[in-house]
């Protein structure tokens, strides 16, 4: 994250309690909390859905889920398995509500530890050649 680190609660200028509560630091999981995907009756999980569920299993936010959140996550992954284009917005909103997206983590006041943030480096453009028109563009 960019910007200065949050101040110690005792050194803050504003003494009121934050409206949405304090930030919670998420530490990496030593082992996944979620079980593997259950078997479906009469159909298979798509490869993309299996990858998504494995990513969710590794996410430290799952340590804070209640049984109702787990049921909601299973319902969401089943919706993801269908992969209907009309369901994309619903899946995105559900993932945000569960804290599985960066926006969802911010909304729930979860902060990913530095160890976890260093694991993945997905910078766009790494290893790609620039097109001729992109080489001539300059920021002014």
Image (cartoon, rainbow, N blue to C red):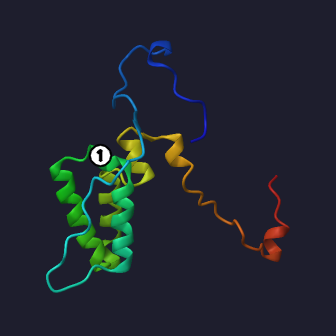
The x and y percentages for residue 97 are 30, 52
Q: How many marks?
A: 1
Residue for badge 1: 63
- Look at the picture and state if 11 lies above or below 114: above
Q: Nearer the viewer, residue 121 or 6?
A: 121
Q: Say which residue appears at 29% left-offset and 46% top-offset.
A: 63
**Residue ranking furthest to the right:** 136
Relative to 49, is 38 on the left or the right?
A: left
Q: Nearer the viewer, residue 125 or 86?
A: 125
The x and y percentages for residue 18 are 37, 25
Relative to 139, is 53 on the left or the right?
A: left
Determine the image quadrant of residue 80.
bottom left
Determine the image quadrant of residue 132.
bottom right
- Look at the picture and state if 81 lies above or below 8: below
Element under label 1?
Answer: helix
Q: Badge 1: few (under 14), some or many (20 or more) residues near its Cα, within 10 Å?
A: some
Q: Say which residue appears at 42% left-offset and 50% top-offset.
A: 103
Q: Say which residue appears at 60% left-offset and 30% top-offset.
A: 4
The x and y percentages for residue 44 are 25, 83
**Residue ranking furthest to the front:** 30
Q: Say which residue appears at 23% left-offset and 72% top-offset.
A: 78
The x and y percentages for residue 17 are 35, 20
**Residue ranking furthest to the bottom:** 42
Question: In which quadrant of the rendered image does the N terminus lie?
Answer: top right
């Amino acid at each position: 994250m960019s910007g200065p680190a949050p101040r110690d609660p005792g050194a803050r200028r504003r003494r009121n309690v934050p409206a949405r509560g304090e930030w919670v630091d998420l530490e990496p999981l030593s082992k996944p909390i979620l079980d593997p995907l259950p078997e479906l009756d009469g159909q298979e999980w798509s490869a993309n859905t299996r990858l998504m569920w494995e990513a969710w299993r590794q996410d430290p936010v799952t340590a804070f889920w209640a049984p109702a959140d787990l049921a909601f996550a299973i319902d969401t992954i089943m919706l993801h398995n269908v992969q209907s284009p009309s369901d994309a917005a619903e899946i995105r909103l559900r993932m945000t509500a569960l804290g599985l997206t960066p926006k969802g983590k911010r909304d729930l006041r979860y902060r990913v530890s530095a160890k976890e943030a260093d694991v993945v480096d997905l910078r766009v453009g790494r290893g790609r050649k620039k097109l001729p028109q992109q080489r001539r563009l300059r920021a002014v």
